[in-house]
Image (cartoon, rainbow, N blue to C red):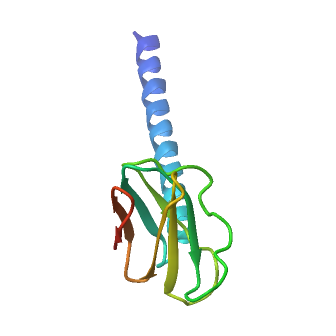
Amino acid sequence: MRGGTLLIMVSDFLFKYISIATLSAALVALDIQIARADRRDFYVYNGNRQNIVGFYVSPPNSDIWGRNIFSGVLFSGNRTLVFFTDNSNRCVYDLKAVYSDGSYDQGRFNLCKTSQINYTGDGGDFAP
């Protein structure tokens, strides 16, 4: 009986240790995510029939869109989070979504007041 009791104690200890380690890892991941948050971070939701193959963010009235910030395709019915990493205080940006057929939608948004941009309809249209 003593061996069985020891096994239960060891098993209980391991369960508690693993539970604490798992919880600690989750809290560290949450801290990293919170530290990385910027008030301009936003979701892009693709409610179109077409896939979004390119997405661009630029300062307002800029003649240059810069690079495509999507590393892949945003498929119809999915969304993704866009993170900001610059140190500016700017809130207003021009956004451009390019679809798989080459068409696009673009508009100006105050990203300090918008948490998700929705692209909807057959070939585009957007709404905060």
Give me the residue at 64% from left, 79% from top.
Answer: 86
Q: Position of residue 8 (x, y in %)?
A: 41, 21
Give me the residue at 40% from left, 48% from top.
Answer: 76
Compare residues 18 and 59 and report the one nearer the observer.
59
- In the drawing, does residue 69 fall left or right of residue 3? right
State the image quarter where residue 89 is shown.
bottom right
Compare residues 112 and 96 and report the one nearer the observer.
96
State the image quarter where residue 9 is shown.
top left
Q: Position of residue 59 (x, y in %)?
A: 58, 85
Q: Is residue 99 above or below residue 104?
A: above
Q: Is residue 101 above or below residue 13?
A: below
Give me the residue at 41% from left, 18% from top.
Answer: 5
Q: Is residue 90 above or below residue 86?
A: below
Number of numbered markers: 0
Q: Position of residue 90 (x, y in %)?
A: 54, 89
Q: Is residue 17 above or below residue 29?
A: above
- In the drawing, does residue 120 fall left or right of residue 79? left
Which quarter of the rendering shows the C terminus? Answer: bottom left
Which quarter of the rendering shows the N terminus? Answer: top left
Q: Position of residue 75 (x, y in %)?
A: 45, 47
- In the drawing, does residue 47 fall left or right of residue 112? left
Give me the residue at 39% from left, 58% from top.
Answer: 123
Compare residues 66 and 124 and report the one nearer the observer.
124
Compare residues 120 and 70 and report the one nearer the observer.
120
